[in-house]
Amino acid sequence: MSALAHKTDPTVFHNSNSQEFVTVYVADQLLGVEVKSIQDVFSLHDLTPVPGARKEIAGVLNLRGRIVTAIDARVRLGLEPRAEGYANVMAVGVQYKGDDYCILVDKVGEVLRLDDTSFELNPLNMDPNWKIFSKGIYRLDGKLLMSLDIEAMLSTIDLGVST
């Protein structure tokens, strides 16, 4: 098979025993978001705050004609919000129950294909604030990659206005 055919044949790279992740960082912790969950990865430029919204809702933005609710992953994971604000913060765009969201992260890394045999359940000593948003972990060369559960990040948040 030629190199070109190898690159364009989707069956060559498809392995049902692995998952593909976009890696992101939140407070120096390596997280993985399944590629199949992601619609966009972009740098945030304009964000409109929502008065009275919960603190994990950073605001809303217009992304190619779609109104997107921005969720601050730092706050959602129980960390302090960004002191420097949201200018040029990286975002991972996802859809949940027909609505558009973006998860604000500190940095976007690379795309990794990880073998299912290296997947482990969450460690017992994992911080409870992080555990509820984790599907499990992968051990990578001296680091742990937490598989971020996007559905958990969004399903447990009250997107209404605070009282």
Image (tube, rainbow, N blue to C red):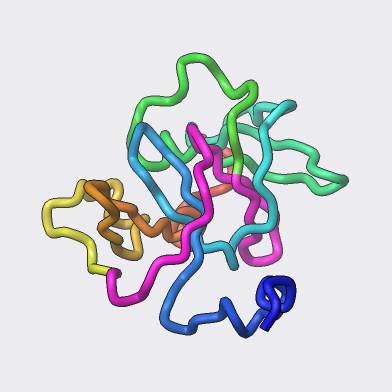
Query: Magenta stretch containing residue 154, yes or no?
Result: no
Q: Is residue 150 visible?
A: no
| Nearer to us in this view, 156 or 28 | 28
Query: Residue 8: x, y in percent?
Result: 73, 74
- Residue drawn at (28%, 46%), measured in percent from left and top? 129
> Quarter of the image holding residue 118?
bottom left
Q: Main secondary structure of the magenta part?
A: strand
* 49 versus 85 height, above or below: below
| Nearer to us in this view, 6 or 100 | 6
Q: Is residue 55 visible?
A: yes
**Residue that extends furthest to the right in the rendered view of this protein:** 65
Query: Magenta stretch containing residue 110, yes or no?
Result: yes
Q: Is residue 27 left or right of residue 121?
A: right
* 18 versus 47 height, above or below: below
State the extent of the magenta-drawn residues as a range. Answer: 92-118
* 80 versus 11 height, above or below: above
Query: Residue 65: x, y in percent?
Result: 87, 46
Q: Is residue 143 left or right of residue 96?
A: left
Query: Residue 61: x, y in percent?
Result: 74, 36
- Residue drawn at (64%, 25%), measured in percent from left and top? 88
